[in-house]
Amino acid sequence: MRPTGTPQTEPTVWRKARFCQSGECIEIAKLNGMIAMRDSKDPGGHMLHYTSEEFRFFIRSIKAGEFDGLAH
């Protein structure tokens, strides 16, 4: 998680999963060359920042079911 000091040159577009029915979900966006993640209930709050490689690894792990037991 390494934020960069590079100014943002493109508009930030926050996305959340289409499965989010309650509105209480995480949102992700590309921000300063990183992938940022925030709580949709607190858009001005703390964000986590990941490199594209870190985020791809996380997504692959989710798809492989590595975190399935955490949601039960």
Image (cartoon, rainbow, N blue to C red):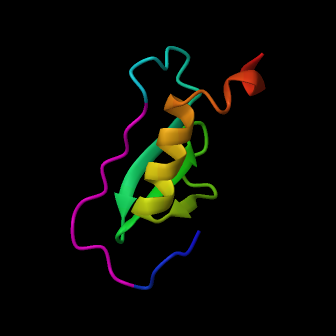
Residue 36 place in picture, x, y as percent: 47, 57
Q: Is residue 68 left or right of residue 1?
A: right
Write down the region rendered in magenta.
6-16
Q: Is residue 69 left or right of residue 42?
A: right
Q: Is residue 61 left or right of residue 6?
A: right
Image quadrant containing the N terminus: bottom right
* Chief SS of the magenta region: loop
Q: Count numbered badges in the picture.
A: 0
Q: Is residue 63 magenta?
A: no
Identify the residue shown where x is 24% and y is 60%. Answer: 11
Residue 47 place in picture, x, y as percent: 58, 58
Residue 14 place in picture, x, y as percent: 37, 45
Q: Is residue 69 left or right of residue 41?
A: right
Between 51 and 66, the one lying in front of the other is 66
Identify the residue shown where x is 48% and y is 40%. Answer: 60
Q: Quadrant of residue 52?
A: bottom left
Image quadrant containing the C terminus: top right
Between 14 and 63, the one lying in front of the other is 63
Q: Is residue 13 magenta?
A: yes
In the current view of this chain or complex, which residue is farthest to the front?
A: 64
Residue 31 place in picture, x, y as percent: 37, 64
Q: Is residue 22 visible?
A: yes
In the current view of this chain or complex, which residue is farthest to the bottom?
A: 5
Q: Is residue 43 visible?
A: no
Query: In the image, is residue 57 above or below residue 3?
Result: above
Query: In the image, is residue 22 above or below residue 13?
Result: above
Identify the residue shown where x is 67% and y is 23%. Answer: 68
Identify the residue shown where x is 68% and y is 31%. Answer: 67
